[in-house]
Image (cartoon, coloured by chain):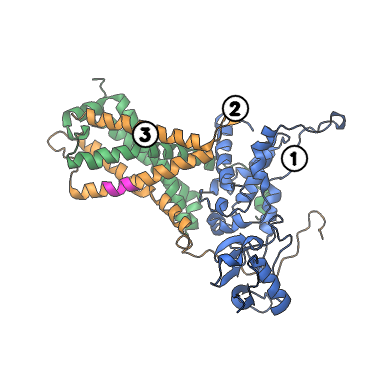
Amino acid sequence: MTEASRLAHRPALAHLFWWFMFAQGGVIAAVLIPVHILVQGILGPLGWVNVVDRHYDTWINLLGNPIVKLYLLVLIAVPFFHFAHRVRYLLVDLGVPAARSTPAQVVFYGAAVLVTLITIWVLLTTAPISLG
Amino acid sequence: MSLPAGEARPALSNTYRWSMPANWWIRKRHYFFYMLREFTALPLAVWLLWFLVEIKRAGDGPAAYAPHGSALFVAFSVVCLAFALYHSITFLSLAGVIIHVKFLGRPVPSRLIVLSQFGLWAAASILIGFALIWFGR
Amino acid sequence: MAKRITIQATRFDPEKDDKPRLQSYDIPFSDDSMVVLDALNYIKAHVDGTLSYRWSCRMGICGSCGMMINGTPKLTCSAFLRDYWPQPVVVQPLNNFPIVRDLVIDMEDFMDKLKSVKPWIVRKQEIPLGAGEHVQTTSQIDDFKQFSQCINCMLCYAACPVYGLNNEFLGPAAIALARRYNLDSRDQGSKDRLPVIAESEGVWECSFVGECSVVCPKGVDPAKAIQQTKLDTTMRFVLPYGNRE
């Protein structure tokens, strides 16, 4: 610990926030993702069960539902804050100390924000909001 | 022997500076599985992006809509599922370490907290799995 | 035929050597209860008096004799030779610290970090002497007891890859001890410790590898302390009126 750092202690609220998002994203990813991969990625394509995303009419109808849109936003966007944090620190562990820097934080968390914005855009433009 | 307050101790001459070996995480099993755990973020991210693309393509109309079904895609999903399960198991187990709550003055045992997390995972999976299949009938 | 065992110990003379090297010693393994520290003491007394290393209580309570034994940080007084024999035992100074000489590392960084978390009871208001002692129930002691077992042996710092990659990281023991005092019902210093704990090189650098808790000889579980501190610190800011410890 350098003398300068000893004198300059203050809570790093940005780190706190990104860790908080990492934790939230981790829970969402852990609890929700596996079943989607199992059903939509394996059982559905193999034809072992009927999955909603292979029936166009029902699927597009569901995509219009605002609750479904909200669920999909949480499912897809929030875990990216978890991924961004993990991949950033994975790089640190692999010997890239630059991944700790502020520009790196902007790149990684900015990417998660970008994915969130893109997800919102996709969900809003794919199927008009209807409560059918 | 203590120095007066505020005085730095004299610098040691020629200490050998440590540097972390680049392959530190291959040297110990526990380190390797830690890196694997961190790595799970990547396949999961790719799979979610696939899903996002599928949702977008649904908006292009029924004629063009053809969700992936190839053997390669299933294989990719199997790999992703393996990573997803590893993420879920490690993350939810560790939640038992981090969450400390008291009930009626006594700390809740971490085993119970971990059980509740896995219970949540099971409940959510059953609910969503059911919804995905029921709406596809 | 008496048993013998080979100890390979790091030698580094700061006045003569550019870098450390391993030196082999072949010694009698006369007693099954011998530990690595006994082997080092035998070497120093009978074979090579120039070998330098730290030790004191030889019973796992002072925290002085931490070294890498076959690549794992251990207390040399608690590592039995019989668990390694007949293979050679490689004894090296603790990872992640500068080497002063042979098996002795520079622990100033750890001492600085320890001091920075104020590992003592901090009171805003002392209770008057006439009021007597602070009373604590067993339940209140149980809140922090595990984290109070730390003997400052630094095995956790040697095990932590985050500390190895970034020497600025506050580290497992310091954070565990900060938590020990934050959880102590007699203490009123949580706010004082917050700037150090919650700074960028504080708890947030930890990526929960968990090796610190694996190597801790006292079962402190610093990894648990750090994760709980992350959560509590976050809640402190997210819920301004709740969950102050």
Question: In which quadrant is the N terminus of chain C drawn?
Answer: bottom right
Q: Have a look at marks 1 and 3 and say if they share a chain.
A: no
Q: Amino acid at mark 3?
A: Ala
Q: Residue furthest right?
A: C130
Q: Position of residue A129 (x, y in %)?
A: 27, 24
Q: Residue at x 56, y 35 (%)?
A: B100
Chain ID at mark 1: C
Q: Amino acid at mark 2?
A: Gly
Is residue A48 in the magenta section? Answer: no
Relative to the observer, which residue lies in front, A94 or C10? Answer: C10
Residue on which disc 2 sits = C242
Q: Residue at x 64, y 40 (%)?
A: C194
Residue on which disc 1 sits = C121
Residue on which disc 3 sits = B122
> Is residue B107 shown above or below C1?
above
Cα distance, mark 2 to mark 3?
31 Å
Look at the image and tell me whether residue A36 can be seen. yes
Residue C141 quadrant = top right
Q: Which residues are magenta?
A: B77-82
Is residue B79 in the magenta section? Answer: yes
Relative to the observer, which residue lies in front, A1 or C113? Answer: C113
Q: Position of residue C162 (x, y in %)?
A: 54, 54
| Badge 1 vs badge 3, beta-carbon distance below 8 Å | no
Q: Residue furthest top?
A: A131
- Give the chain letter for blue: C
Does label 1 or label 2 sit earlier along the sequence? 1
Q: Secondary structure at mark 1?
A: loop
Look at the image and tell me whether residue C183 can be seen. no
Question: In which quadrant is the C terminus of chain C drawn?
Answer: top right
Chain ID at mark 2: C
Q: Amino acid at mark 1?
A: Ile
